[in-house]
Image: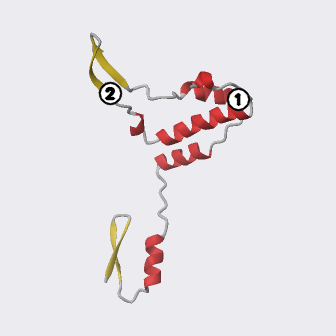
Amino acid sequence: MFFCVDSCNFVGVTDGLKEIELMDFLNKPQVNNSLLNQLRNQLDVLEIRDDKLARLLCTIIPSHCPFERNISILGRTLFRIPPLCKLNPLYEQVVGLRFKCLMYLADECGEDVTKYC
């Protein structure tokens, strides 16, 4: 007898179940409707078509982590705070959105985007 885990519940699978059916069950994509994944998907598919919005997002979204710091006293570094932005679960999507905005401004509007870097 095989056992499979489905949504944290053990489901018994009989010996008579065909191996193909078992593999189909195990390979079935699990639908995750969490709010976080919905936000990720919305940010990934968002298209930038307005230059004012693109400029605003490039201004609001920083080009580097604002939390990264070197703590110094009298010119001597005591410790360093590493970049904490990667702890943000939406970090990749936000950086991707900023990149889309920069690309839109450079390609579609012909704007110099070095001022946002």
Q: Residue at x 74, y 34 (%)?
A: 108
Q: Quadrant of the C terminus?
A: top right
The three-letter amino acid code for the residue at tag 2 is Ile
Q: Residue at x 52, y 44 (%)?
A: 39
Say whether marks 2 and 1 touch (CB < 8 Å): no
Rendered image: mark on residue 51? 1
Q: Residue at x 30, y 26 (%)?
A: 80
Q: Secondary structure at mark 2?
A: strand
Left or right of 29: which side holds 52?
right
Q: Residue furthest left?
A: 78
Q: Is residue 34 above or below residue 7?
A: above
Q: Secondary structure at mark 1?
A: helix
Q: Is residue 106 above or below residue 39?
A: above
Left or right of 83: which side holds 73?
left
Q: Which of the pair 91/35 is nearer the observer?
A: 91
**Residue receiving disc 2:** 81
Q: Residue furthest bottom?
A: 16
Q: Residue furthest front?
A: 76
Q: Picture coordinates of residue 13 (x, y %)?
A: 36, 81
